[in-house]
Amino acid sequence: MSRYVLAPDSFKESLTATEATEAMAAGVRDADPTAETVACPMTDGGEGFALTLASSLGAEPISVPSHDALGRPIEGLIHRVGDTVVLDVATACGLELVEPALRDVLNCDSYGVGELVLAALDAGARRLVIGLGGSATNDGGAGMLAALGVRFLDARGRPVATTPTGLAHLASLDVGGLDPRLADVEVQAACDVDSPLLGPRGASAVFGPQKGATAQQVMLLDTLLTRLSALSGTRGVALASEPGAGAAGGLGWAILTFLGGRMRPGVDLVIEATGLREALTGATAVLTGEGAADAQTLTGKTAAGVAAAARERGVPVVVFAGRIADDARALLDQGVAGLVTITPEGTPLDRALAEGGRNLRAAVAGWVRRHQ
């Protein structure tokens, strides 16, 4: 009997990872009703990371009063299981929480993320897993740090706002008030990018334009983050070049520098939590996927992580995606056995997103029939 392990990420704006897994399972059954399927929904550290990991761990959701990137009151969310708390920065300072007409990266900060971390500490967290991705901010984590007790001061010792506009007046940091409970907490940051904090591959240059920053604003933002790291001492300067430091507008750097955090590919954390490696034993194939597959998929994305795990077990991997770029063929050198586009040629984007589940089901069914 054939046995398929289903390990997709979400298909952005179309399917959650769980919905994609269900569509894949339906496709396998359409082609081979006798086949066994094993569901292992994945995520790489972007939006939806905490929910996917929490589901695998059986964690309890807890609503937390928080603020969005513009400082408006919202209900944030953390997930607790035992003394482990999982959270996504996007549930507090996410880009999707800010209406397109109001998006202004110079006047956004990550204060709400700090409120989620405080709630985790209040809930007794001894291990904190933070999903980095989908933020509207480029404040180097200053907002989060302010919520946790760090003071940001101008040349006269007066507090400054932790938005980039406020940080333009930053002259010094006072870390004496940083919540002491953080010293006893293991912090892991789940990341799907390897960008440093600064420079042409940094937070501002790579992700600033996605948040509405103009070319001139990108230069300003990078200058502000350079100053912020310099004012944070030798540790802050050294960690600015770490892979992932630029994630979520520099929140990665703040977690490394001030919270003693460790950066890990989000997909590795989820692979461990779901027991994917064990599930692969004896599998016919593992089916994974995401909204778009391209060369960037190799840098900490779900398909690359799943392929690496499957390669250890000698199991073929097939990647399904709504769009497959020409440079995605590099995945074939990483142990991927096949790349399958789920979207019929010529389908308008809005229709492709609406019919993602149906298209994924049909594509999986077609592949299974061809390879029985």
Image (cartoon, helix red, strand yellow):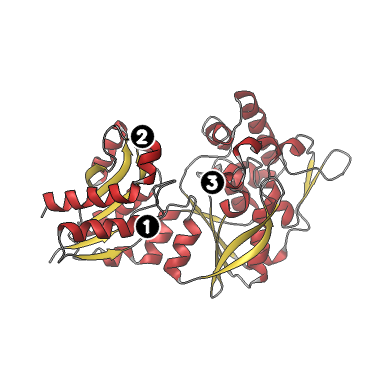
Which label sits on residue 298? Answer: none
In this picture, residue 23 sits left or right of residue 166: left
Mark 3 → mark 2, Cα distance in angstroms: 25 Å
Give 303 or 178, whichever is nearer the viewer: 303
User: Residue at the spot x=50%, y=40% of the render?
Assistant: 195
Q: Quadrant of the N terminus?
A: bottom left
The type of residue carrying mark 3 is Gly
Q: Looking at the picture, how far across and down is residue 59, in whole percent?
A: 50, 71
The type of residue carrying mark 1 is Glu
Mark 1 → mark 3, Cα distance in angstroms: 20 Å
Question: Which residue is label 3 attached to?
Answer: 134
- Say which element carries label 2: loop
Q: Looking at the picture, how far across and down is residue 301, in whole percent?
A: 39, 47
The type of residue carrying mark 2 is Pro
Q: Quadrant of the C terminus?
A: bottom left
Tell me if mark 3 has few (under 14), some (14-19) or many (20+) residues whose alpha carbon lies within 10 angstroms of its own: many
Q: Nearer the viewer, mark 1 or mark 3?
A: 1
Number of marks in picture: 3
Which label sits on residue 348? Answer: 2
Q: Nearer the viewer, mark 1 or mark 2?
A: 2
Give 260 or 39, whichever is nearer the viewer: 39
Tell me if mark 2 has few (under 14), some (14-19) or many (20+) residues whose alpha carbon lies within 10 angstroms of its own: few
Give 326 or 20, whichever is nearer the viewer: 20
User: Residue at the spot x=83%, y=40% of the render?
Assistant: 154
Which label sits on residue 19? Answer: 1
Q: Looking at the picture, how far across and down is residue 82, in whole percent?
A: 54, 75
Residue 31, picture quadrant? bottom left
Q: Nearer the viewer, mark 3 or mark 2?
A: 2
User: Residue at the spot x=34%, y=67% of the render?
Assistant: 275
Q: Which tag, 1 or 2, sits closer to the chain's start? A: 1
